[in-house]
Amino acid sequence: MKKFLIAVTALLLLSAATLGGCGSPSDPTPAPPSETPGEETIEGLTVVSKEEVNKFEGDSLRYFGRTYLNARDGALVLDNAATGIETVFYGTRLEAQITPVQTPLILHVYLDGNPEGKFYRVLRDKRYVFAEDLEEGVHTVRIIKVTTSQHRSLRISDLTTDGKFLKPPKKDRPAIEFLGDSISVGGGILGAPSDMGSVDNSDSTRAFPYVAAGILDADYSLVATDGICTKAKTALPNVNMIEMYGYCSSTTFLKYEHAPDAFDVVVIGTGTNDAYALSTGYTVEQFKLDYLELLELVREKNPAAKIVCVYGMMIRHAQVEQAIRDAAASMNDPRVTTLELPQSTGGAGAHPDVAGGKAQGEALADYLKTIL
């Protein structure tokens, strides 16, 4: 996966004076509609003002991942891959202001649950129309940042409809946190083995975490980026997963405030880059200690969650996989388990391809159904 190392220029630590705090995802179970007399509803959903929606807090939107606010303009920042929002509105049109920090970036936008969606290549600061000329009625638009945090962030502001915004319906959904590397963010998933990974042939919405979350209709957060190791810093020198887990992203070093009851399950998918690191003098014994340190950190931040350690998605390294199993067993916790997922190497740089990401996501979803 070293092919996916992006030449990162000196990354300045972004200060809280520029960006808002990075907290836990919004409560995955929205509060029930208010009983206030005279409250306006449409098809059973509570009407909410444009101003309230564009505060980007509370239950006026559904949030995915470690979103946070830019303190200067109040815009919502999407940094990690597969981070985004879902909005419900009554009308025929939806648009928003999109401001990229760096280009190009890719958005995958889904209208009314259509699984194909539409891709938007973000090249400059402008208004994007995500829905138009629809039949007047209730519609749902999901906006997901496909591109990883190594390609930096974008901001969403001024969501606008020609009708009225509605609070998303309340549902009892599982909440899942995923930790991983380029496999988890769909690095090269649209390419061929001879290709180099790129923004255009990568898609986090085709990778196994997003696929599994979709099957389960789960609220989720993806903490992952290209080249990252559990603790070593070989392919990605600026951050490892143990460090990234405490930040907003791999390039925004603001503290992430973990909520102890935020997730039902945490899925850990690191290890592939660690296997590559063995050629640099890194040892399997050290990897086992590092992986155990990550497990203990995840348990500390998620006291009640089930933890699933997945492996086998790309290259196979028997000693590394055994170290993952041994580290999980040494936790002496029945809520910590391991799962081998189907191997796939048909994408760019021998990463999983689309069919592989789908098979891996389905296998993970099947397993999660047995423990949720």
Image: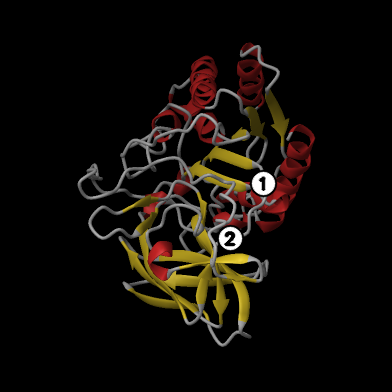
Identify the image quadrant of residue 77: bottom left
Q: Which residue occupies the foreground of this view, 47 or 224?
A: 47
Q: Is residue 114 above or below residue 179?
A: below
Task: Residue type at mark 2: give it.
Answer: Pro
Q: Residue at x 54, y 49 (%)?
A: 185
- Give the SS element for disc 2: loop
Q: Quadrant of the C terminus?
A: top right
Work out whether residue 194 or residue 227 is closer to the camera in this orientation and state it: 227
Residues at marks 1 and 2, CA–CA distance in whole angstroms: 13 Å
Residue at 72 percent of width and 38 percent of height: 341
Q: Is 170 above or below relative to 295?
A: below
Q: Earlier in the sequence, mark 1 or mark 2?
A: 2
Seen in the picture, residue 86 relative to 183 is either above or below; the reply is below
- Disc 1 designates what residue? 173
Task: From the viewer's perspective, tell me whether residue 345 is left or right of residue 282.
Answer: right
Give the farthest residue toward the bottom. 133
- Horizontal side of residue 225 vs 352, given as left or right: left
Task: Tell me the SS state at disc 1.
Answer: loop
Task: Give the class, few, some or many, for how many residues have Cα within 10 Å of label 1's Cα (few <14, many ≥20).
Answer: some
The residue tagged 2 is 168
Q: Say if 55 sits above or below 223 in the image.
A: below
**Which amino acid lies under the numbered mark 1 shown in the image of this protein?**
Arg
Query: Which residue appears at 31% of the width and 72% of the height?
Result: 125
Whether label 1 touches label 2, CB < 8 Å: no
